[in-house]
Each structure stands twice: as structure tokens, then as C-alpha cells.
Image (tube, rainbow, N blue to C red):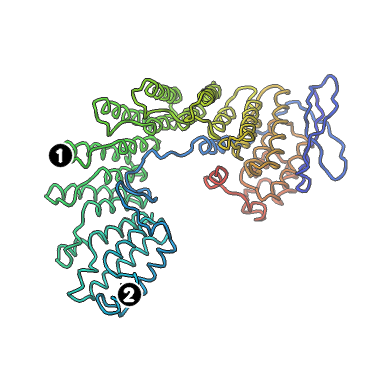
Amino acid sequence: MQKQEILVLLLSSTLWSTLAFTPLSFHPNRIESKNAFSTLNSVSTPLPSLSLERTSRTRCISAATVFQAESASSSGEKEDHTVQMNSSNGNRHKGKGRKENPAMGDMNFLRKRTEDVLRITADGYEVGSADAEIISSRGMKVDRKTFNWLIDAWAFSGELDASDQATALLTRMEKLYEDAGPATKHTIRPDVRSYTKVINAISRSGRPDSGELAEKILEKMDQLYESGQNEMTKPNTHTYTSVVEAYANSGAPASAIKAHEICDEMAKRHEEGDADVKPTSRSFNAVINAWAKSGEPGAVQHAEDCLGRMEELYEAGNDDVKPNAYNFNSVITAWANCGEEGSAERAEEILERMEQLYKAGDDDVKPTTISYNAVIDAWAKSREPFAAEKAEEILRHMEDLYEEGINIDARPNTRSFNSVINAWAKSGLDDAAGHAEDVLERMEKLYEAGNQMVRPDAHSYSTVINAWARSQRQGKAERTHNILRQMKDLYKNGNKLVKPNIVIFNAVLNACAFTNGDIREQNRALEIAHSVLRELDQSPYGKPDQVTYGTFLQVCAHQMPDCDSRNKIVNVLFQKCCGDGQLGGLVLQQLKVMASDDLYEELTGRKIDEEITADDLPQEWSRNVVEGKWRRRRKLS
């Protein structure tokens, strides 16, 4: 039996920052390791000798799923495939030819002016009175133009109370119009723009009831117009489109169905002779996005059917619904994100349709980098056996289109390469990590040759690290550690795009935890894990979290035999974890696998056969744990 003396890492919270390696003297016949765990304690502690004989032990719960989730975040930076022609995504947007409202640039001014208008026009104010003239002479003219201007500013403000402020202004307009005399009614009467702007504000609010609120205003406009009470409130294309977008943005159950119904109503009105209402590419795009986000059964097929309906209406003579690249990209992205079997093939078929139309002379549907990237993403997410090959095939097709001048708008960018790397990382193939690293090396060579569009970023490197961490290849701990060191060197030399984060450090630890091979390789994985853990705690890249601690415990479980020395490491690491407030589910799971009954009870105060969560233990132990997607967002920000 080969034995190696190894220093036990006693991680006390007070001495953690003084971690340092201590060289050991080894027996000439033993495997030599220049770096080993150092003993840290207030007094000198004799170093126990550990047997590295492989022992049968309970295998721990794998952290692979945790790192798969993290990889999705680290390797998949977001790109807006469904570039909006409007503001249906809830963000500020200046439409084509739209004049900027100066009130949008100064929220203090907008709030003050709104408060002044509502205060001045409170009970007792009369449009056209002497008081009104005085107010007008002071620069506060109370008329429809002023109200519409303020409502419009609120609609595009992005403020949380924007829809409430816009509604309050409209309500005051209606009251002033109702109370005004015949000679002055026309100056304050709400018109179609007044109501439509309020609907627009509601649409942008993202409220779950925004669709219903918007439709109620639409119905009121119809009622006022049909009854003759206000002939200036006849709904138009913009009004209906804003209602469609309100449902699309709400995310409420059945919102896609309602958005679709409103869009169909637009088409019906136009067919019946209403020249003021007809569906447009913008309204259909809102419906497509509503279906894409709905999660309803068959939703993506409904989205594609909308695209087909647009083509039918266009061929029937409605030029305003001519499908464009935005509409096609929205449907491609819907297929990419739906997770249905065969979705990647459908996404690629739509891309091919775009290429055919473009070759036939339709420049409005010219595929762009966004179009191709969406299809690459679809293949990366598909988990099909040949998905990675298909993704790389599309990337090379993009390169050919650009280099041959056939479509210069299809030039690959960093996102294109990252998506292909991600496809390889998720493929599960034996040689996936090697292929992923090959794509990264292509990026590096292109960037070094002057192509700024494909500059590798943190996602590029972290996805390759995850590919190696998931592989079964020998030497993966060393490979991931080398890539991490390369990232740190690049960052220190001024490339801020490759700053390592905690997810990347955790992925390297994961590679160490699941390293296979002989004793030498397993010992090296143990050394790398210690180095990474120590560096993370002392670095500007972040601090250890629950995944860090849980994964390091897995390193110990897989790379060390069950012995007193390992128990000491578990003991001190658990205390450090609790002191940092990072006791999460992964740590508890691993503790139950590794610790003896007595040690488990000593550390948690509970029997090992009890089913407990971190919530059952002192709150301060888990005070800094952030679970799920919120943890990933925070770590990647």
C-alpha cells in the first residue's frame, strides 16, 4: 500500500486568511507532491499520515446539476433575438421619427409639473376662467396639449408609478371636460391620443392586469365615440396595437389568447371598411412574443401561425403586415426556447425560409447575425445527439456568407462562438471538451488577427471550463486550472471582459471533485482544489458561497479516504461555512454523506437520520445563501 503524508487543512474562521502552503519532506519511495495542505492552528499540530488506498465508501450526491445550471448562466449571455420594432418589451424606446419629449429626461421636472397641474386643476378650477388665464400667463397652460405631453412623458418614463400618473392625468382631463363651458370644452377634450397614450403607459407597466385595464379603456373609447359623446375618441391602429402589447407584456394566464383575439379584431375591422384600424407588423410581433412567453400547449406553433397569417394578409394587399426579419427572428427564438422535440429543426427551417426569400430579392427578411445565433442557440438547447455538430456547421456557414460577401450582416460575433462552445459543452460527447477548447482557440486567433467582433469574454472561457468539468477525460483538473490562470492573466493585463467570477472558481472545484485516475492525479486534483479555495477567499473575484463549500467537500470525499484527517477537514470547513453564512442544501447533503453519525450530530445538533434543511438550523448559518437563479444572477453581475 502506498502512503503519502499530507498536511491537514484546518480551516478556522480566524486564521482562514493566513492560508499558506508548507513544503513537506517525503519518503523517497512515496509519490512526491511539492504542495500539500498546511496545518493552521493556534498551536503546532502534529501531521497525521493518511492512507491513499482507495476504500469503498458511499458516493456523494453529485454537484453536476448545480454546475450545469451555473454553466447555462456563464456560457449563455443574453442577446435580444426578438428585436422589437416598438416598446413591447417594457423598456424606453424612441420610435422611428418620434420626437423626444424633453420631460422624459428630467423626472424631477416631470413629477413637479404633474403635481402642479393636478393641484391647480383641483375642485373649483374652470377652464377659460380668469384664474386660468393667469395660470397660462405664468407658463402653465392647462389644455389638451399639456395633458397629452405629460401623459406621453409618463408612458416612456420607465417609472414604477408611470401608469398611475398617466391615468390620474386622463381622469382629470375627463373631469375638466365634463365641467367646462361650451366655449372652452374643445381646448381640454381628451382625444384618441390621450387615451392611447394612457394605454401605452399601462402596456409598459408590466402589471399582470395591464391587458384587462387597457381593454377597458379601449371599450370606453368605443362607447364614447359610438354614443356621440366624444367623436375624437375613435380607436385607431395605435390604440389597438397598444392593447395587444399590454396583454403581451402582462404575462397573465391566457394573455396570448387575448392578444391574438385583439389582433384578429383589428383585421376584421379593417376588412369591414374601418380605414383607421388595420393590423401591422408591430401588432403581430406582439402576439408572436405573447405566445412565445405564454407556456401554453402548442404556443410556439401559434406563434408560427401568426407569421403565416401575416404573409396571407400581405399577399391580400395589406402592406403594413409584410413580415420582416424581426418577425422571423421572434418565431425562431420561440422555437429555440420552447424545449419541444424537433424545435431546433423548426428554427433552422424558418432560417432557411428567410434565406430563400432574401435570395429572391426581399431585403426586409435578410437574415442577420441575430437570426443565425438564435438557431445556434436552438441546437445548443436541443440536446440532440448531433446538436453540437449542427451548431458549428451554422457558424461556419455564417463565416462563409460574410467572407464571400453574400451576406455581410451575417458576420459571426462573440455570441456566435460562445453558443457553439455551449453546444459542445452540453453535448455529453467524449471529445466535447476538446472541441469546445478548439472553438475558443479559433476565437483567440481571429481576435489576435484583428477581428474585434469575436473577442473572447468570460463566458467563452467559463463554458470551456464547464465542458472540461463535465468530461470523463484524465487531467481535467489541470486543464480547468490552466484556463482559470489564463483568464486571470488576461484580466490583470487589462482585458476586463474576462474577469473570473465565483461560478468559474466553483467549476474548477467541480472538475477536481470528479477527477478520475491514479493516485498521482487525484492528489494533484486535491492540491488544485486547495489552491483555488484559498485564492478565492483572498481574491477580488468574489467569496466562497454554499456551492464552493459543498463542492470542496465533494473533493475531499472523492479524493481522500475516510479517515480522521478527513473528518478534521470536514469539521473546520463546516464551521467556516456557517461563519460565512453559507450553509445551503449542497453542504448539508454532502455532510450527511461524508460525516460519521457522531460528527454529524456534533456539528448540526441533529441525528444523521433526521430529514432537515438549513431552515431547521440557526438562521445566521445560512444568512448569506442565495438559491437558484437569483444566486446565479448575483454572482454573474
Q: Nearer the viewer, residue 285 or 238?
A: 238
Label 1 to label 2: alpha-carbon separation: 51 Å
Q: Is residue 251 above or below residue 300?
A: below
Q: Amino acid at mark 1?
A: Gly
Name the residue: 79% across, 26% down: 34
- When asked about the image quadrant of residue 461, the answer is top right
Q: SS at mark 1?
A: loop
Q: Quadrant of the C terminus?
A: top right
Q: Quadrant of the N terminus?
A: top right
Q: Which mark is residue 135?
A: 2
Q: SS at mark 2?
A: helix
Q: Amino acid at mark 2?
A: Ile
Q: Is residue 14 above or below residue 343?
A: below
Give whichever of discs 1 and 2 has the lower sequence position.
2
Name the residue: 52% across, 28% down: 425
- When asked about the image quadrant of residue 288, the answer is top left
Q: Is residue 624 above or below residue 495?
A: below
Q: Is residue 46 left or right of residue 576?
A: right
Q: Residue 268 at what x, y percent from top left?
A: 16, 48
Residue corresponding to mark 1 = 317
Q: Residue 571 at what x, y percent from top left?
A: 75, 43
